[in-house]
Image: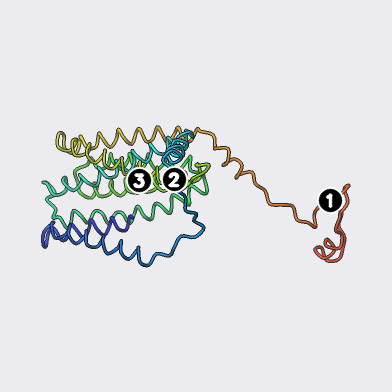
Amino acid sequence: MRWGGLTARVFVGAMADFASWRLALGLIGGFGIIAGLLAWRFLPAARHFRRQRLNARSLLGALAGQSHDPGLRWLFAFGFLTMGSSTALYNYLGFRLVAPPYSLSQTATSAVFLLYLVGIASSTWMGQLADRVGRRKVLWICIVATLVGVAVMLARPLPLVIAGLAIVTTGFFGAHSVASSWVARRAPRAKAQAASIYLCACYLGQSVMGSLGGFAWSHGGWPSETALLAATMLAALAISLRLSSLPAASHERGALTLTAPRPAWASTRNGSCTNRSTIRRVFGGKAHRCR
């Protein structure tokens, strides 16, 4: 998804300079149709899939069941805010860069989307860091980094604007990586459905925040845009801190306490070994007393 967004935005910007934006959008639409046909033709059939009859009542009940867990509710709101803010930032930064004092071309402006490469790398890095120190710690760190980047982008020099955008992108992509994986882990059942609700919240946030970002830009320029981004990120920070204080779901606690089964040769009965021949083979012929 991120690779597609990167290439499409850079391609459209370049085409808008050398041809027209109408031709660029037409080509993007054509590529989308071709990609859909290729997926329909060559993707393998689903495995372990059981077809079920569509039942509106059971579907709505399952959707409502996903909202019973407070952690999932907060994660859905988190996705709404973070992905919406990311869209607003990238959408309206272009207007800032093509205007004075920068006056960049469409090609140069669209090149800022190459910073998606930084975000793709940070998704992997933050995911690995979350595995080591925990999602609860990494999530709010990503949001703090995003707030720092938004503040840096208030500066006028172009190198500082680009540096701030790189910091913001690192935080955004890292937060999305951690939150999306947390949804799948937190959901007790119907994990695919929980992940789809999270993605729906993300795209709904992009629609709403994209519109609000345009209102902020039209009425106050970049300072107004920054205020909107800071407000949403502070709300996301509050959610991440709330998530860090929530207890793990019951099925998560159960997964953490699983232990490996005791090997047969170590089993005991009345304090003595039940399979001394096995123990002799393991310890080189000398029978050791079981403890």
Per the image, the residue denoted by label 3 is 172
Looking at numbered disc 3 in the image, what kind of residue is underneath it?
Phe
Q: Quadrant of the N terminus?
A: bottom left
Mark drawn on residue 268:
1
Looking at numbered disc 2 in the image, what kind of residue is underneath it?
Gln
Residue 124 percent location from the top left of the image: 43, 54
Mark nearer the viewer, 3 or 1: 1
Residue 137 percent location from the top left of the image: 47, 40
Could you say whether the residue bearing mark 2 is in a helix, strand or loop? helix
Looking at numbered disc 1 in the image, what kind of residue is underneath it?
Thr
Q: Name the image quarter holding residue 264.
A: bottom right
Answer with mark 2 or mark 3, whichever residue precedes in sequence: 3
Q: Is residue 72 above or below residue 270?
A: above
Q: Nearer the viewer, residue 154 or 4?
A: 4
Mark nearer the viewer, 1 or 2: 2
Question: How many tags in the picture?
Answer: 3
Per the image, the residue denoted by label 2 is 193
> Within 10 angstroms of label 1, few (less than 14), some, or many (20 or more) residues?
some
Please name the residue shown 13% across and 57% down the image. Answer: 22
Q: Nearer the viewer, residue 263 or 48?
A: 48
Q: Is residue 39 above or below residue 223?
A: below
